[in-house]
Amino acid sequence: MIRMTRRRLRLLVAGVLLAGGVGGPALLGAGTAQAVVCGTAIAAGTPCTLTGTLGVTAGTLTLTSPTALAWATTASGIDQQLADPTTAHQSYLVNDASASAIGWHVTVSATTFTTGTLVLPNAGTFVTTGSITAEAAITAPTAACSSGSTCTLPADTTTYPVAITTAASAPVAVNIYSTGAATGIGSITIGIGANPVGWWVNVPARTLAGTYISTVTLQIISGP
């Protein structure tokens, strides 16, 4: 009886090993169901997978600038430095929807300030910076994301103040704001908050009375 009991025990153990080896799934708990591709009827408890695709089409890079710049003064017998005092002139809007992240820069050129017969000097007359209280300020205009835009703020590499040398014809454009790759993405207002865009003209004491006009050209260009 003892020998028979031992033999039965050995057979039982062998059966358990067999079930745990070749027939392992018979003793293991049910495994996680394998996912299948969605789109056909699948049994309850069986996951399926599908692909979600978002297509983004490139938009455009645009600049919305002031419609005019203006200064006025009364001759005082001394040289004067004048900042455009109109709030609407002290900022501009850059909307980089190009989806390229290669950066951009804003340029300005201007013709000679002239009444038609009288002129202001081409060098030293027109200046821009990030201040309306100090022409020589080295601060950049403040940049902020426009409402509704989770933008990437620009990293301005321009050195201020920027002298804009005028010319009677074919004036040279100069960078007044420049940002590198992976910055300046989205809708951004330049000149909002603490440091507005300061547009300055210098009026020498010898300047004669008159209305001096210059054609100012702004442009935004893709790339830093």
Image: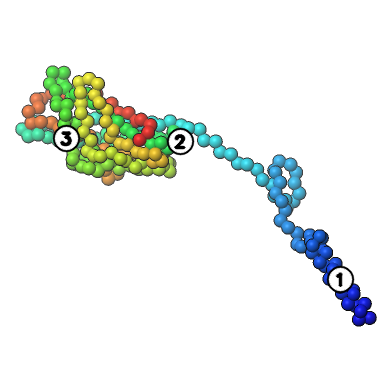
Q: Are marks 2 and 3 in contact (CB under 8 Å)?
A: no
Which residue is located at x 24 percent, y 30 percent?
69
Which residue is located at x 30 percent, y 43 percent?
142
Tell me the quarter of the picture where residue 210 sits.
Answer: top left
Q: Are marks 2 and 1 in contact (CB under 8 Å)?
A: no
Tell me the quarter of the picture where residue 109 sits.
Answer: top left
Mark 2: amino acid: Ala
Mark 3: amino acid: Leu
Q: Quadrant of the C terminus?
A: top left
Q: Crowding near pointer 2: few (<14 within 10 Å), some, many (20+)?
A: some
Q: Which residue is mark 1?
A: 12
Mark 1: amino acid: Leu
Q: Which residue is mark 2?
A: 99
- SS assignment at label 1: helix
In the rendered image, the residue lying farthest to the top is: 117
- SS assignment at label 3: strand
Q: Crowding near pointer 1: few (<14 within 10 Å), some, many (20+)?
A: few
Q: Is residue 190 above or below residue 1?
A: above
Which mark is drawn over residue 166?
A: none
Q: Position of residue 75 (x, y in %)?
A: 9, 31
Which residue is located at x 94 percent, y 81 percent?
1
* Marks 2 and 1, how far apart at CA: 70 Å
